Amino acid sequence: MRAHLDGQRVCGHRTHAGKSRAGLLIGAAVLLAECPSIMTTAQAQSALPPVTVEAPAQRPKPVRASDQTSRRTQAAARQRNRNPAPAAPTLSERAAAEAAAQQAAKLGYRAMPSATTLRSGASPLNTSQAVNVVPEQVLKDQLPRNIDDALINVSGVTQTNTLAGSQDAVIRRGFGDNRDGSIMRNGMPLVQGRSLNAAVESVEVLKGPASLLYGIMDPGGIVNTISKRPELYQHGSVTLLGSAFNASKTGADGLLDVTGPIGDQGLAYRFIGYGVSEDYWRNFGRHREMLIAPSLAWYGQDTTVQLNYEHREFIYPFDRGTAFNPVTKAPLAVPATRRLDEPFNNTWGTSDLMQASVEHRFNQDWKLYAGYSYNTETFSANQLRITGIDFTTGRETRSNDGTGSSLSNVSYGTSYISGSFWLGDMRNDVVFGGDGQYRTIYRDTLIRQTTPAFNVYNPVYGLIGPGTTASNSDSAQTDKLGQWSLFVQDTLHLTERFALVGGARYMDYEQIAGRGKPFNTNTNVSQDKVLPLGGAIFKLTDQISLYASYTQSLKPNSTIAPIGVVIDSNIAPEEGVSYEAGVKFDLNKRISGTLALYDLDKKNVQTTKTNSAGNVELHTVGRAHSRGVELDVTGRLTDSWALIGSYGYTDARVTASEDATLLGRKLQNVALNTASLYLVYDFGTALPGQLRLGGGARYVGDRPGDSTNTFFLPSYVVADIFATYETRYQNTPVIYQFNVKNLFDTVYYPSAVNNLNVAIGDARRVSLSATVKF
């Protein structure tokens, strides 16, 4: 007879018969934790062939040790046949087990960057630039409302001109604006509207010049938002949230997030739907937004395909904030809730994002990535632009301005190969590829209309309507940029502890910009450039490394406005050069961080000057310099305590200028000191459900409110708290979450365009949500 042994061996462990599916999932989670080199997904779908044992002939003979072993084997086989083993874990079961194993790390604020940020799967310890991560769980706990709210957790980041709260605009290491193209989704550029939404899982910042990997860029770095991806086990959640700035300023959010497999061949889907309607915290205005984000993924044995789409519709208050008295340097003496414009000050529009990517692994060492992204956003806006205020009488002059039929889009494609090969006894980790980008920013109709004066101390709203008079000379604002590049980077491991990094990008680009009906070209540039990168890495241990790097950035000089001369290829682009050194650590896969020192110089900064004949001359002799120290830490301190914290020292100034009023001045909206610390305590199993309490604060030092430093925005500290409690209702997981943002209702000013346009941070906001998982 044949005795069949149906138990399988996986990484040296045998599954046993008679166990429940829940037990199987727990066991699979343990196996995933213990066996990093577990079989591939495709292998997991196939059962191993049964093992057969021939029974010995039934005839009397002396009992020997080998016979006893044979009889024990037969008895074990008969027992297994009576209790057949369960089938091998399905893709869905394995995915669920893996997710369970990762959940504790997420709750502990474990942070590892996406492969799209560094164009490879390299560990941060093996790279020569700083990468800071705001993990998924931090976003869930803190509930940031925009990208600069999420980046309070990262050192050296401050807000700049957000176009009245309608666009992302963050400064990193002293540089950045709302048109710098530095905001990414999965490593591919977005038009710079509002990039943080319910489809985003985490946020990452690659610090310093990033032109080697990303092309035309300011030298502060890039911000990469990472999408939530389809998963191979069925689950979902519904969240309802109610919020209030005060008793009369309330709102509600709703979120549906569901994902799971389609069939059993590695195909998965995800659908995210989100809506919000809430009162603005100032005396009038409303925020409404809707997001639909379906996505598909196929996880093959060696190939992964991702497809995602986002459609967003929005209306925001277009709010320029308040004003600062140029004499007293103090804010306007009115309540922070009082707006200086009109209820029709809004921006509204739609945004669509489509992305596709393929990753194929040729073998254990080499893989190919190819991605394409198309993002378009249309919007219109009404605004009463403040042109002057008599701070004694309260008389305010305003221009009834607006923007009609604005269109921005960016089309981007990239493909690169990453892998390793040996040169003698030295390993080379190589990334080689290319990319192409075409970006358009277009403002069709610009409204410019005079309007009666207004008294800010005794306001009467609603006496006027939106402007209707188009200014042909200001309309048809156009900025078109195209670039095509090849890049290569090699990390040469001279020893097990020491590596050198080298790379270069060849970039060809062209830019056309101008405005007016009829159209006037004010920028017409076509150039090419080679940008190098160099670095070194020394690993003190497997958990601590030292690094140093030399990096460059490039951005063409351009203008949409007439300045007496057309910017052409004879005018040098802005170029950034950075030297950086620091230490990175990843201790026991619990807590990670970076301490960085940098020195960054940007030259060929564009300035204009009126000559003795009264003509405007363009000069590119301006120079800005930034140097600083940054510390970022995130992770789990103990089994109960988790933290994310940062400190940044940023000394950014103008070091060369023909304009004496700018020479030596600090860069606008850049704080000398920033800091943040958020702590979370997890009660674990001490209570019937899972209770987590957390809170913290961020500090931003004083900053110049304009380029000539005529006034400064005061420093501030803003504190937040939250609590989550996960329990079960009739065996259904339910999570309740309570958040208070700006706990002490601090009045603060995050950024300024000038003394008449100073943004005001949100007032205290209380929210309570309930999430049902299924």
Image (cartoon, helix red, strand yellow):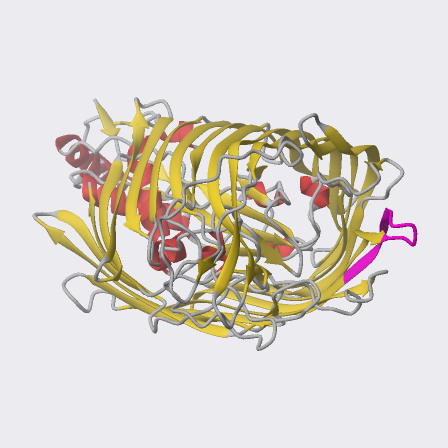
Q: Which percent across, then down, holds residue 735?
A: 21, 54
The image shows residue 185, relative to residue 317, as above or below, that is above
Image-based side of 288 in relation to 506, left or right: left
* Front residue of this view, candidates 326 and 483: 326
Q: Magenta segment: does it hold 623?
A: yes
The image shows residue 125, relative to residue 746, as above or below, that is above
Quarter placement of the N terminus: top left
Image-based side of 654 in relation to 639, left or right: right
Q: Which residues are magenta?
A: 610-624
Q: Which percent across, then down, holds residue 138?
A: 40, 57
Image-based side of 646 in relation to 601, left or right: left
Q: At x 75% / y 41%, what residue is drawn? A: 558
* Front residue of this view, candidates 440 and 3: 440
Q: Which percent across, then down, holds residue 449?
A: 54, 42
* Front residue of this view, candidates 7 and 343: 343
Residue 121 visible somewhere in the drawing: no
Q: At x 58% / y 68%, what residue is drawn? A: 631
Image-based side of 244 in relation to 468, left or right: left
Q: At x 21% / y 33%, what residue is drawn? A: 86
